[in-house]
Image (cartoon, rainbow, N blue to C red):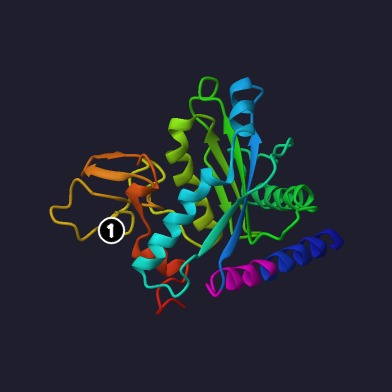
Amino acid sequence: MLRILALLLVLLLVAVGTWRDRVRSTQWRVPLFVAIYPVAADDSARTSAYVAALSGERFASIDRFFAAQARRYDLALQTPLQTRLKPALHERPPERRADAGMIDTLLWSLKLRYWASRQTAHASEPADIRIFVLYHDPALSPSVPHSLGLQKGLIGVVYAFAQEDMDGGNDMVIAHEILHTLGATDKYDYATDAPRFPDGYGDPAQSPLFPQATAEVMGGRRMISQTRWEQPAGLDEVVIGASTALEIRWLPHAS
């Protein structure tokens, strides 16, 4: 009984903290500070060199994307968020098992939040959102696990590639997970990765409908035809759709 009560207390504290973070992060009165922590996820010399060469300017396209999308929705705040590159970490975050159930996922979430707080405890400035980007050598890892963005704790774990010509795709994944931390939901079919119509399309009112000129950021793919889709090369081919804007309270009638 004591263990159950302790778990319920933890769940209550997490729920209250999540609600408070949700309200604070979507008021859009001041820019959100997004701390980006790079991590070399393998022992490749290529990955180490890539991470060592990163600069803050490398992530400026993410700031520009959110600013441009905010203008589309007449958001009063001209700069919704500002990314800041932080020193590389040498410890990798706890991994969630692919077959993890609800309890295991909850425990993993708590472990991740504890790990993140320990890694960033001595940060020189506070962050609203913390994104941990795990870079992989594509020669060793041609595919990577699905990235994750948690509202609980405003934390994202992004699996990315340590290759310059894949920076645009990495940026899109980072933006996608940032939006998850703010309450945006996926807008694609988990079985096929195809964007859902209409909320997963860049412009569901476009005529003719295909090929779509843009991708919706939470849809993740640009529709070429009714049966074909592709991943955008970068954020200049991506938009925040109305459904996502509603979820992050960029529309005035959001509750």
Q: Which residues are magenta?
A: 17-29
| Quadrant hosting residue 21 | bottom right
Q: Locate residue 81, reporting x and y percent.
A: 53, 61
For disc 1, the marked residue is: 198
Q: Residue at left 42%, top 55%?
A: 65
Q: Residue at x 46, y 58 (%)?
A: 185
The amino acid pointed to by label 1 is Pro
Residue 230 vs 208, above or below: the answer is: above
Q: Residue at x 79, y 53 (%)?
A: 121
Which element type, helix, strand or loop, lies under badge 1? loop
Image quadrant in which you'd find residue 37: top right
- Residue 26 included in the magenta stretch of the image: yes
Decide: is 32 above or below 132.
below
Residue 149: x, y in percent? 56, 52
x and y percent of residue 216 in the render? Answer: 35, 53
- The residue closer to the viewer here, 172 or 243, is 172
Give the quadrant of residue 165. Answer: top left
